[in-house]
Amino acid sequence: MKMNRRKFIYGATVSAATTALSARSWGQVSGANGDIRAAVIGFNGRGKEHISEWRRLKGVRLVALCDADKAVLDREINHLPESGSMQTYTDLRKLFENKDIDVVSIATPNHWHSLAAIWAIQAGKDVYCEKPVSHEVWEGRKFVEAARNHNKIVQTGTQIRSSVGVQEAVKYIRDGNLGKIKVSRGLCYKRRPSIGKVSGPQEPPKTIDYDLWCGPAPLEPLMRKNLHYDWHWVWSTGNGDLGNQGIHQMDVARWCLGVNALSPKVFSIGGRLGYEDDGQTPNTQIVYHEYPEAPLIFEVRGLPANPSDQKTMDKFKGASVGNVVHCEHGYVVFPGYEQAIAYDNDGQQLKKFQGGGNHFQNFLEAVRSRKRQELHAEILEGHLSSALCHTGNISYRLGKQKSPDEIREAIKSNKEAVETFGRMQEHLAANEIDLNKTPATLGVFLKMNPSLERFIDNDDANKMLKRDYRKPYVVPDRV
């Protein structure tokens, strides 16, 4: 049969479009033998578990590893039986050039998360990124934009979102079984001892490219004993325990409230109390996010319940690292990653929720389906919860030391904040810390335009939403 020119061109165009769509949708997930080919970036900590997860999931082949510290890279690769076929990199930019990698999981220090992920997305990869997904608010939003603009699947490493028990408990709360929420509270009572104090600049490990390790952060002298892990407690690379362990519980607290924007008002109280060391971030902190629905209150405690027992931490309603959601007719306690218990106002147990999940498997399924809606912790969720940590820290960093009476006077109109501060003061007193002699910092009371993710009438706070990037490690305006 004859085909006229117009039909031929139309058919060719449709065919080409279909082929292009197929390449965009499946090009990254086919791989040899149909396997998804994965790479892990950064594994001196949580990244080790990334390696384990990828190696045990069906339909995935771990094909590349990257770490800026060659000693860490060599140590890990030597433990893997498939090391002979594994590609290794110290520079993540070289890894992104490899077109035979479909997905990357990122477990670098916080200051690298957004830039590494954006570069990976621009190189055509899907991304699993550890929490917090950003070091500042602005770059987290750019991360979201990059995922949207390039139609990539991005999972945040807040793995509690995949726990069946927690999912059921959140639904139970949001369905109104205990009435309206009065307070959504997150807890990070986790022991954090002093990191010590050095007398001058330290030599970075010879096995590491220190310029590359610093990346987007300033190339500053190393002013602490340990380069690794203790970067959490320095502002240029970390976000304190609020953005380390606490981001998990901040995410659950926001999830329970059902809010999908930053809070209109925020303030923080705290300090690095009980010791003097090279750390900068608070080891004791309260963050108060004022939402129209109900307040979100977060508490950080790095000191023990009593100095005579350095291992035992305080508990609130049975939780140390977890959440407590106070409602009209009872409350729900989340004492861990896979469990929640509902109580009435008399403390009688009403219902128990239990069950875990596989966060990496959820990511893998979404990579195959190309449906970001299937993700349990899609990048927008990660950005919002991370940003709540950042805005709380901004309030703290702009604050000034005040006496306990001055702090109580400033927050007296807010009974939940007064109660939380009172318990914080009791906790510090148990650790022989007198806030009249060693004052805490009262953060600035900040107002925000949630739709713009900008503070209102506070230039100093807005400057802290975005860092001054160091070339060539720059998060681009256009992603």
Image (tube, rainbow, N blue to C red):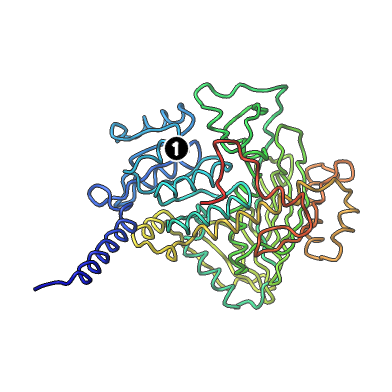
Q: Observer-nearest residue: 11 or 102?
A: 11
What residue do we see at 76% from left, 46% from top? Answer: 397
Q: Is residue 178 left or right of residue 365?
A: right
In this view, 161 is above or below 126? below
Residue situated in front as seen by the camera: 128 or 250: 128
Q: What percent of the width, then of the height, locates residue 110?
A: 57, 43
Type of amino acid at the residue the image marks with label 1: Arg
Residue shown at 34% from the left, 57% from the top = 24
| Residue found at x 14% / y 71% | 3
Image location of residue 57, percent across then percent down: 34, 51
Question: Is 256 placed left or right of 456 in the picture?
Answer: left
The residue closer to the viewer here, 13 or 251, is 13
> Which of the 4 image quadrants contains residue 468?
top right
Q: How far across and how far down the image is residue 405, in percent?
A: 91, 53
Disc 1: which residue:
93
Q: Position of residue 179 (x, y in %)?
A: 65, 78
Residue at disc 1, secondary structure: helix
Give above or below for 189 relative to 202. Answer: below
